[in-house]
Image: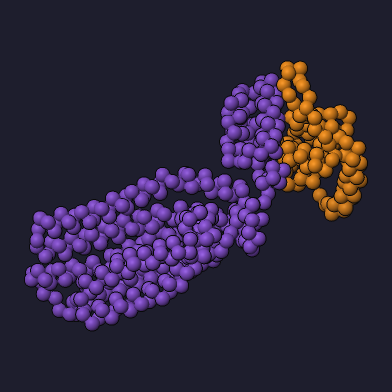
Amino acid sequence: MVGSDVMRGYNDFMILFLLLDEDSYGYEISRQIKQISEGKYIMKETTLYSAFTRLEKEGYIEAYYGTETNGKRRTYYRITKEGREFYREKCEEWELVKEIVGKFVKM
Amino acid sequence: METILSYLENMFLHLPRTSEVLRAKEELATMMEDKYNELLAEGKRENEAVGIVISEFGNLEELSEELGLGDLEQTKETGEPVKRVSRGEAEEYISATLKSIRWIGLGVMLCIWSPIALLILGTLDESGMFMFTDAQYVCYGLVPLFVMIGIAVALFIYHGMRLERFEYLKKEPIEIDFWLEKQLRQMDEEEHASFTLKLIVGVMLCIFAVLQLLVIASIDQNEMAGGFSTAALLLVIGVAVCVMVSGSGKRECLKVLLQEGEFTKKGKKSSKIIDIVAGIYWPIVTAIYLAWSFTTMDWGFTWIVWPIAGALFGCTAAVVQAVTGGGES
């Protein structure tokens, strides 16, 4: 399990990644994060929601209402062009972080 | 699922009902419900699922900015320099005060108890059963009086100094963030019952103390009974005041932090004036007490200066507050 402090800078990044191929909604995203990280990282609901509003404000994602088969209203999120660009920048940034921090790792 | 919804309801209880807040609540509820249903589908028991959902909910404070609760309105209103009080400072202040207030209560009790020995000596002397020399008066009457007052003053000074670094909370305008305020208000609600109970106990003791004096005075005109009864009055009132002073500690802190009662911004101005008045008033009272006592050597009676001075000071403070418009929110 990784603490939320360490991951703070990368929450937005992970959410954008999950939206690259298809639109998604709150729980689905948190489930996928848990699954992809093999249960090593669980994003808290409040963290997730905070990231959604932040990303939305920055114009990286858009929210819209979708209707489930059972008739329930649900908020879906869609990545924007700016969001994709931001994601690419973050990927490059991550490579750099990995390179720099990696130089200080001794196991 | 109801447990989860009521948990969420509780978390949002004191938040303003803005559209941002309502949207956040709705979205969080949906996410929690989805997770809960999935956990049930995985074969988890209901209790277990509720536990997991709640433990993974996170912390609403994380959403302060998103919910528009980051800043306090007060700063915008006045533009005066306002000191922001962090949660750590507030908690430190409360725990330090709670520690000190017991000792301060004890000090007040000792002050009230201090003339008891003299009073009893005087009563016994007047009854004619015993005759005391001046040396005995000093030894068994005055020494306990000054020792008790000495200990009390030492307690006041020591604990006053320990709490001095928090004085600004009482005197300067402060602000706390929304979450801290919410937490403090909750503490205030929880504290209310125990504070009221202590107050009732204190008041009942005071009434009892006066009542026994009246009853004894009416059935027994004997001087000796009156003297002992007065001693008992001081004894009981000492305990009562100690209970009320130490019982009020937490509430007082919360009032300071929430800037209520006499600690509103206006109230802080009038308390500065009262401070100045007190700085002149109490030394004068002390001088009067000592002068009177030493000239008449009537120590068994001159202590009456203190309750009268206390009551007069209370009146003065109330007048100052009324004139400066403090004490109202």
Quarter of image, res B90: bottom right
For the residue pair B224 and B278, the one nearer the viewer reads as B278
Quarter of image, res A27: top right
Q: Is residue B139 visible?
A: no
In the rendering, what colour is chain A?
Answer: orange
Q: Residue at x 47, y 69 (%)?
A: B273
For the residue pair B153 and A41, the one nearer the viewer reads as B153
- Residue A31, image x, y percentages: 76, 30
Q: Is residue B73 visible?
A: yes
In the rendering, what colour is chain B?
Answer: purple
Quarter of the image containing the N terminus of chain B? top right
- Residue B171, image x, y percentages: 53, 64
- Residue B71, image x, y percentages: 67, 51
Q: Residue at x 74, y 37 (%)?
A: A48
Q: Residue at x 13, y 58 (%)?
A: B217
Quarter of image, res B248: bottom left
For residue B287, side relative to residue B323 (left or right): left
Q: Residue furthest left?
A: B128
Colouring scheme, one of rainbow, by chain, secondary structure, one colour: by chain
Q: Residue at x 45, y 68 (%)?
A: B274
Name above or below for residue B238 compared with residue A34.
below
